[in-house]
Image (cartoon, grey):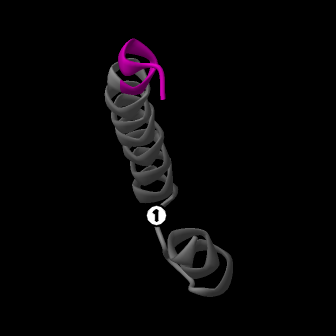
Amino acid sequence: MLLLSNFATLKGWPAKVVAADLAWGTALTTVVSLVAYYPGSWIGA
C-alpha cells in the first residue's frame, strides 16, 4: 500500500500510476490464486 501512501502525501503523484498499479496487482493476485487453488482442489488438499 506504499503507492496509496505516496498518492496521499506527495504532490503530483499521478492517479494513473495508482490505478494501473492497483489493476495490475489485482490481476496478478487473481491469477496466482487460481493457479494455486486448482491443483490443490484436484489433489484434495
Residue 32 included in the magenta stretch of the image: no
Residue 38 at what x, y percent from top left? 38, 18
Left or right of 1? Residue 14 is left
* Residue located 37% across and 13% down the image: 42
- Looking at the image, which residue is at 41% across and 53% down? 21
Quadrant in the picture for the N terminus: bottom right
Vertical order, 15 against 32 (above or below): below
Please tell me which residue lies in front, 34 or 39. Answer: 39
Mark 1 neighbour density, 10 Å: few (under 14) some (14–19) many (20 or more): few
Q: Secondary structure at mark 1?
A: loop
Q: Position of residue 30 (x, y in %)?
A: 44, 31
Q: Which residues are magenta?
A: 40-45
Nearest the camera: 40 or 13? 40
Label 1 sits on residue: 14
Percent position of residue 10, x then y? 57, 86
Q: Is residue 41 above or below residue 21?
A: above
